[in-house]
Image (tube, grey):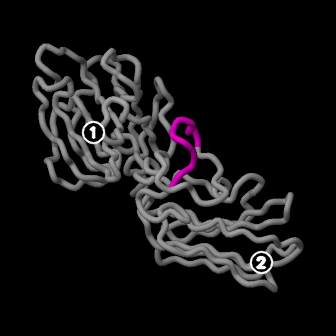
Amino acid sequence: MKLYGAMAAALVLIAGLGAASPAAADPVPESEEAQILATNFQLPFPCGQTWTGNSSASSAHRSYEIDFNRGSTADADKGDTVVAAAAGTVVISSHQGSTNGFGNLVKIDHGGGWATYYAHLDTRTVSVGQSVSQGQKIGTVGNTSKPGNNISPHLHYEVRLGDNYPSNIQRAVFNGVTFGYPQQTLTSQNGCSGGSTNPYKPEQVCGSGFKVIDSAKLGTDGTVYLLYNSSNANNCVVTLKAKNIGKATAVSAYLEVQGKSRKTDSGNFSYYAGPVKAAAPSTCVKWGGKAGSSTYDSPWEHCS
């Protein structure tokens, strides 16, 4: 089992995620956390901006909605850029009038029943049916709402799964880590370094007891790691992607113990290839992997 496509990756159940937990084998496909990580949501603001989110300041909040501000005065954020937390298709871009308190609302469908909501916008810069990329501007922070509802400017942000409101409102995950409810200040990684950050670490993929002893960059496409567990003399190789995070693309990892057949994990994966494990007490190994057009092949090494 492997991370095949946008809905196949997992660390832990969503309610327990604070930081990624070990994944000694493949993540469980189709779990809630798998699907969130597959979209690899980022903060809905441009790279480098710092915003404070609060899920408890508004009486209108039912569960995991977040209101974002960063200015020191009530109107300081009005007109600030709002960007898509993940790639998808715009399914709502309208002023909701008296329907609800959302005012100018943009809803983006990310597939698999997942959607993000951006409410109270001052302006909307996308239209229904438009495909948007992660980090693309979709509007500006405002205070639009239903008639008679006077609110200060802020971004109201939600992640939903399915249509059973309000139980479909999910905990928000940014850059692979669940938001620190009820309040947290975060710096956006959305669009930084030309893309998203891989939420996995090599130690998490290989599991408890493994430590990185060597690594090789695969151009700008990823990094292949060699890890070792001193308690059982096991080696482990994993290739982590640095591009096309959350999208199934070709990636591989291999490990060969001298005198034995090579073990390889290769395919179209969303986050990583591996883990490839083998015992090699006092024995040389070859290891390597591929991501994008870059390949690494080690010599016989790490013999003791």
Q: Which residues are magenta?
A: 9-19
Name the side, left or right, on which 238 lies relative to 174.
right
**Amino acid residing under circle 2:** Val
CA separation, marks 1 and 2?
49 Å
Q: Position of residue 289 (x, y in %)?
A: 60, 75
Out of 124 and 14, give the one closest to the viewer. 14
Say if mark 1 contacts mark 2, CB within 8 Å.
Answer: no
**Amino acid residing under circle 1:** Val
User: What is the crowding at mark 2: few (fewer than 14 residues within 10 Å), some, or many (at least 20)?
Assistant: many
Residue on which the image places disc 2: 285
Q: Secondary structure at mark 1?
A: strand
Q: Is residue 212 above or below residue 218?
A: above
Q: Position of residue 155 (x, y in %)?
A: 29, 30
Residue on which the image places disc 1: 82
Name the side, left or right, on which 44 lies relative to 91.
right
Q: Position of residue 3 (x, y in %)?
A: 50, 62
N-term mark: 1 or 2: 1
Residue 18 included in the magenta stretch of the image: yes
